[in-house]
Amino acid sequence: MRSPMSTASISNTGELSVKPIGRGYAWLDTGTPDSLLDAAEFVRVLEKRQGFKIACPEEVAWRRGYITDNELSALASKYGKSDYAKYLLRCLKYS
């Protein structure tokens, strides 16, 4: 039986793997309209209070060295003057 703070997956060979979720992670159930709204509000509040985006693929790629500063800047420009573009440029500025 899984605890509420674990994830389970099945490998290609059919082997079940259960791993505990460490501190700093949150499991957000989005199976109903109300729980989806709760999850969206959680993400909005966390991003606003902490000042960082959750699941920003461009930032992850840049921080892991998969793309350069120039490539991140070019990706940000594709979002125009949006808050998302400003966030990506802020990452560069304060790195």
Image (cartoon, helix red, strand yellow):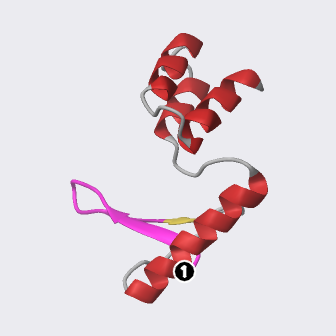
Amino acid bearing label 1: Asp
Q: Residue at x 61, y 48 (%)?
A: 53
Of residues 75 and 61, the one nearer the viewer is 75
Please, is residue 89 above or below residue 29 in the view? above
Spot occupied by residue 28 in the image (x, y as percentages of width and height): 52, 74
Spot occupied by residue 42 in the image (x, y as percentages of width and height): 62, 71
Left or right, 94 with reference to 82 = right
Residue furthest front in the image: 81
Secondary structure under the numbered disc 1 in the rendered image: helix
Q: Work out whether residue 68 can be spotted.
A: yes
Residue furthest left in the image: 13
Q: Residue at x 71, y 58 (%)?
A: 48
Left or right, 52 with reference to 12 = right
The magenta segment is 1-18
**Disc 1: which residue:** 38
Spot occupied by residue 59 in the image (x, y as percentages of width and height): 56, 33
Please, is residue 44 above or below residue 90 in the view? below
